[in-house]
Amino acid sequence: MRARIASVRLIAALILAALAAPAMAGPHIVVDVGSGRVLDESEPFRRWFPASLTKLMTVYVTFRAIRAGEITLKSPVVISANAAKEPPSKMGYPKGSVLTVDNAIKILMVKSANDVATALGESVGGSEKAFAGRMNAEARRLGMAGTNWVNAHGLHSDHQYTTAHDMALLATAIRREFPQYDSYFAIEALQAGKARLNNHNSLIGRFEGADGMKTGYTCPSGFNLIASAQRRGKRVVAVVLGAESVEERAETAAELLARGFSRSSFGAKRLDTMRPYGSMLTTATNMRPLICTKTARQERLANRDEQGRRVISSPYMTAFDRPRRVIEVGLGGTVGPLPVSAASASNIPIPTPRPAYTPTVAEGG
């Protein structure tokens, strides 16, 4: 009987190991932004949960709205009841608070605040659902065939997914179409009242030429990063999905970027003409069993120095040995009418139903 139990346990362990193995090396892709050529890739069409990489699409839709004359950087963003109830990571502004589009974008790129993301979506699109529709319309226009959006913040939904290939399409579109907004993605820190908010992107200030773009984390997605850097007139973007820690995603992205700068794009495949291939094209990997166990959390906490700082060991990165450049953000300063969705209390959007979600830790960055 004992032998049978041991055999069953061994089989179960082997099955779990087999299931876990593919998720431990998540998808990635590296692109030369100027030429649109792919410099490196691994499972670029594998479906994945985007987490707060979502906020890149949120700001892209916002940039498009600004260019269309719908809003300006000083237009008001109103924190609705729906936005105020979003779980962390968040700013915690009370319902009815008003901030500029400009400050909302800065907060999304640095703090990755879910309440501000929802408020920005509602203020631009009229409602959370309508804004998701605009996100999907832009995704289709860009050729992001493996992507679907249901919210502006990236908190988990089984119905919100993407691929490394699609996020590379989005990142290159932002860089090409809106160079005037490059500075948003490289902000080192924000000052919000008494709170100092450092950017979650570990490459900024530590990798030569790093200039953004966005991090993302939830238990199902693991640790994601879209990293961008420029050297000698060449800009490279690396998309890293499903790392098991902040340190791993930073080290992986740094290595991929360095490799990208050393390679020529001559003769490489074009990002916008790639066709789907590989496995798991219709089912997203769920990293929760690897990311949000007690053991996994303890291992991440152990990788810190005596001051509690994360230990990132990469030959491609240096220590951040200077004061961070800090930009102040806050409420007020708006110009123009309130968005239609917040013009009166009766028009504040009611929450859009989404799958039940109970965060155990702050998510979003």
Image: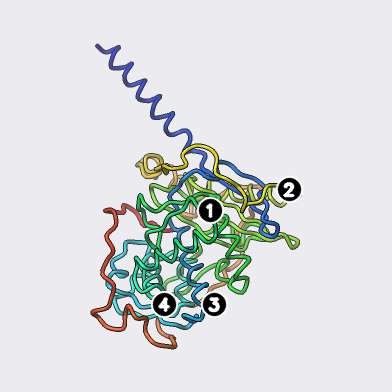
Q: Distance between the residues labelled 3 and 4?
A: 31 Å
Q: Quadrant of the N terminus?
A: top left
* Of the pair 223 and 233, the residue shown nearer to us: 233
- The colour scheme of the drawn protein is rainbow
Query: Residue 58 in the image: x percent, y percent?
Result: 46, 66
Looking at marks 1 and 4 on the same chain, the residue that comes earlier in the sequence is marked by 1
Residue tagged 1: 166
Which three-letter amino acid code belongs to the residue tagged 2? Arg
Mark 2–mark 1 distance (CA, rounded to whole Å) = 22 Å
Regarding residue 49, the answer to whether it shows in the image is yes
Which residue in the structure is indicated by mark 4? 193
Mark 2 → mark 3, Cα distance in angstroms: 35 Å
Q: Would you place residue 247 above or below residue 16 in this image?
A: below
Which residue is drawn at the image coordinates 38% and 48% (left, top)? 219
- Nearer-N-terminus badge (2/4): 4
**Res. 121 image quadrant:** bottom left
Q: Which amino acid does label 3 sit on?
A: Arg
- Where does label 3 land, which residue? 67
**Residue 351 image point, x, y percent:** 27, 66
Q: Is residue 299 above or below residue 105?
A: above
Cα distance in 3D space between marks 1 and 4: 37 Å
Question: Contact (CB < 8 A) between labels 3 and 4?
Answer: no
- Nearer to us in this view, 344 or 98: 344
Identity, as a three-letter code, of the amino acid under mark 1: Asp
Q: Which of marks 1 and 3 is nearer the N terminus?
A: 3
Characterize the local packing of mark 3: few (<14), some (14-19) or many (20 or more) Cα atoms within 10 angstroms. few
Give me the C-alpha separation between circle 1 and circle 3. 23 Å
Q: Where is residue 32 in the image (x, y as percent from the top left)?
A: 68, 55
For disc 2, the marked residue is 263
